[in-house]
Amino acid sequence: MDEKTKEEAALSILRNMEATAARMRELIVSMPPHDLLGYIYAQRMIKGIADHSDDQPQLEMNGQKDLINEIQFLLEYVHAVLASDAEPAEMTFDEGRCAELFEHSNSLRELAMLFAMVSSADTKNGIFGPNTADIEFQAKSTWVMLRGNRHQVLEEEFYRYVLAPHNEVLKEVYGIDASEVAIGFQAMADATRSGHADAGTVLLEQFEAAQDFAAAQGKALKDVMEAWAASNSEQSKTAGRAIDDMFRGGIANVSHHTKLPPALLADLAYRRGEETEFFAAGDYAGTPYRTLPARKKPLIQIGSDYYAVDPCFARDAGYRALLYNLLQRKPDYKKVFEERQKIMSEAAFADILAAQLPGATVLQEVYYKDPASKQWAENDTLILIDDVLFLVEAKAGAAATIASPALDFGRHAQSVQDLVVKAYKQCERFFSYLNSADEVPLYHLVHGKYEECARIRRSDYRVLVPIGLTVESFSPFSTYCKELPLIEPLLGKHAFVSLSIDDLFVLKRFLPTPGTFSHYMEVRQAVAGIRRANLFDEFDHLGAYLKKNRFDQDILDQLKSGTATLLIWDGMSDIIDSSFEGKDWESRPLPTQEFPEEVLRLLGAVDTTRAPGWLSAESHIRDLGGEGRKNLAKMLIDLRQTLNQHPARYFMLSGDVKPLFVWLQRHGLPIDWDKVNDKASATALAVKATISIGVVAEIGAEGTYLQARSFAVNIPTARTEENAHIYEDAVRMAQPTRAVNLKKVKKVIPLGKAKNPGRNDPCPCGSGAKYKRCHGR
């Protein structure tokens, strides 16, 4: 298909979309909104029950997702029409027109996807270089198809955090504080999430109560209903609300399901006919490639009540609309508002992830003299924990979620570029400064003067992660930003990562310890540095990590052929998404990577001890694949069980991973660090390692790991008189029966043991008693 033919095809599809949208508008406006909403919501319930009886769970799950997307897409159009059209004098519900509406809605979705493909195909180059066409298609299709990819149960947590800085002003303007607003948004989400099930439970309870009443009267149920309703007025009202929820769209009625004040709901809602842009004359009129009204205001006023007709955009649209109207009502608050937003967003990473960053040095608003410009420069937040450095630049990202990529992809992408590049450039400047000397000073600005607050060395940090953080998610661009030609790994090796505050609330749940979080960020950064490979959002990255661990290596293997122009992993977030489903989601265990119990005990001791280098040790162990973890567990168990005969045992794992030297020491005996270091060096020479890490663990009488600390293994590069004994030891260790190699999983043998003292020798613990009367008993 030549370029002209493609343009004609795209135009034809566009006109079909516009005509289909116009017909949908006619159908929606002609029917009573309560009846229409009730019908649409009921379809999800009815079809969901029918699909649930299927014997093919995977097909059932895919069918459910398709059904959810189908209905939520239609609900957006219901919201758009109600916002755009005044209520007509006459309306009649017609199930045949509802069926036609569903057909047109599905047709519009299909046309929109086809348009995304045809209209993007001719993009030869652009802001994302040679991958611009692929990314343009992804952006357009996501704009149309992505619905409900948020975890609704976390609404309260998000709103409580991001609105906390404005607590006093919220109370002044709306009469409720941030926590009450957050509870209201959670109630809004819960109503659409579980409203039908809750209503069904209520109706069943009321039906059983009425049956008991009839039985007590000795009459038929139909003969006592009026009497039961009269004597149980409150229960009758409850049943009426449940019926409304089940059959008249009542689950979307936020006036009933939340305690949010009418003034706040009005600020989040369109009045009938208030929206004038979505169906205005011109290209894309009424198509999903215009900005849907729900992206700007998530609610609609129907009669005297407010409805969240479309539940999917309540998070971002609600947050933006709330803050916008807060400033409209109190314009003199703007300067203070901006300062408080800045403080909140800059502190968010360290604040939300406090459990993952124990004892970290957190420096905010860090200043330094830029060697290039000779001017003072500033960065938002610097976090130093063990040998890991996080540099966080916070930015606002609303434009990327409101501007349509179809109307002007260049402008849409430019807003994203501006967002990402500003944060990237600030990180780049800091990393260059950090690299400008062996040690660099950092400053705080105190009362107009720069005062030194810290000195840091780049060489002290094994991992350095530059991060751009936004309040709101702007997937998929947040993960595609690495395709921007100017986004290169800083200093040639430290890839830039884009995250949102949204993401942090999920990461903290699934990566509860410092070691798991730090290791995930290492892998995440590795993927961020791989061009032509994309996962949709942070939850896909997290899911891939939990399923595959070093999934960056899997991606590199898939790209080795060099024929792929863009590699996309899809559906990796399923284990994350399913963790937030059901009423018992908080009590169910979260998915984790599989580790043998013995290895978890060692990791737990490393985390508890937290000696310098502990994150490096955890990373080293967590890099191991399934077989490596099993081998490590076997060696730990076998040698730990012999510590009642020997004061210490040691071994090294090598093979397809970086060598790991482990020294197990019976607790209560002094550690001979000279011997530990010599044995570690010898084992590294024996396996011809260029880099190795060591872990020393102290084992209690019951086999418990009391402490575990890491150390850097010194690998000699030349034989001298002083280290000759190490080289001789390495020769002995290099014998085939002495090595532990992960490639030889069937034969796992320890490298050696520390010699047990004689029974009459002084006890190594330093007590002064003979070994037989002390630890040798």
Image (cartoon, rainbow, N blue to C red):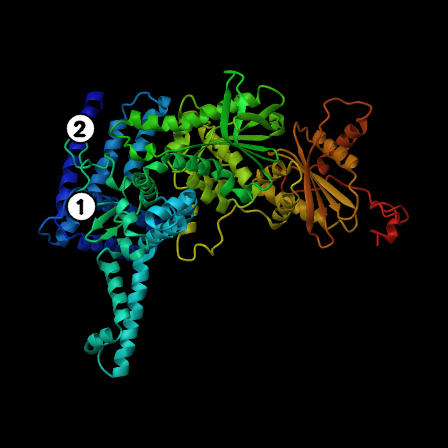
Badge 2 marks a residue whose secondary structure is helix
Q: In the shown orientation, is residue 613 left or right of residue 120?
A: right
Give the residue type that dot 2 points to.
Leu
Neighbour class for label 2 at 10 Å: few (<14), some, many (≥20)?
A: some
Of 67 and 462, nearer the camera is 462
- Residue corresponding to mark 2: 11
Query: Image point 41% across, 21% down: which residue?
Result: 485
Neighbour class for label 1 at 10 Å: few (<14), some, many (≥20)?
A: some
Task: State which quadrant residue 95 falls in.
Answer: bottom left
Percent position of residue 353, x then y:
51, 42
- Residue corresponding to mark 1: 272
Image position of 724 with respect to 649: above or below: above
**Which quadrant does the N terminus fall into?**
top left
Q: Is residue 532 visible?
A: no
Of 461 and 533, nearer the camera is 461
Give the residue type that dot 1 points to.
Arg
Task: State which quadrant residue 269 falls in.
Answer: top left
Q: Of marks 1 and 2, which one's residue comes earlier in the chain? A: 2
Are discs 1 and 2 less than 8 Å apart at CB?
no
Q: In the shown orientation, is residue 80 left or right of residue 705?
A: left
Task: Specify the label residue 536 is tagged with.
Answer: none
Percent position of residue 222, x then y:
20, 76
Image position of 441 with respect to 386: above or below: above
